[in-house]
Image (spheres, rainbow, N blue to C red):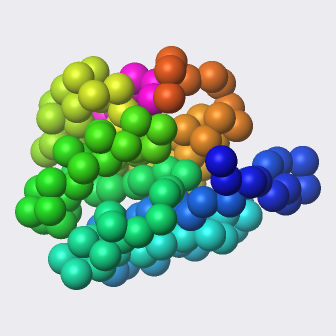
Amino acid sequence: MAHKHSAGNRTLPADPILLIDDDPQALSSLVITLRSAGFDHLVLCSGDHDVQAAMAGAPYALVIVDLNSPLAVANGILTMVSRLESTPLLVMAGTAWSRACRESAERDGIDCLMKPVDRERLLAAVRRALGHGRPAVGSRGTRSENPHE
């Protein structure tokens, strides 16, 4: 089991958070937001090679993937991650994918955030997934947040 370290009054995971998005600007925004909250142990994937290498790598505390990203579809990321029972998954999607995101949340028990995701909503979902917020159901809590509805 991975050890955790603390930052202030919060315990941070020892395993990295895996970020998957083909949009470099979106990936950069995620990194800035997470690092500003003390989550510094990150693995970034923006290309096919990155994803394949990352999925074969170490365990992850959390996987955050953009459902709109061709990397998610082409590499079967959701299927791969869903097999990692103890790894929480956080999916982000644009409004065009809101139905698919909600269905994934219900079917697979994953958190789903609708874009644009503001900083506080993202951090709350990350903390929840890592067990720092409200308790999830099992290792993955079924939750879909759509501020557009």
Main secondary structure of the magenta stretch: loop
- 17 vs 103, left or right, is right
Query: Is residue 109 in sight in this rendering?
Result: yes
Q: Position of residue 22 (x, y in %)?
A: 24, 73
**At 24% across and 72% down in the image, what residue appears?**
52
Q: Position of residue 21 (x, y in %)?
A: 30, 68
Q: Nearer the viewer, residue 127 or 36?
A: 127
- The image quadrant where one finds the C terminus is top left
* Residue 62 position (above or below residue 15): above
Q: How many marks?
A: 0
* Residue situated furthest front in the rendering: 1
**At 49% across and 51% down in the image, what residue appears?**
62
| Residue 129: in magenta span | no
- 62 vs 56, left or right, is right
Residue 134 is drawn in which quadrant?
top right
Q: Which residues are magenta?
A: 140-148
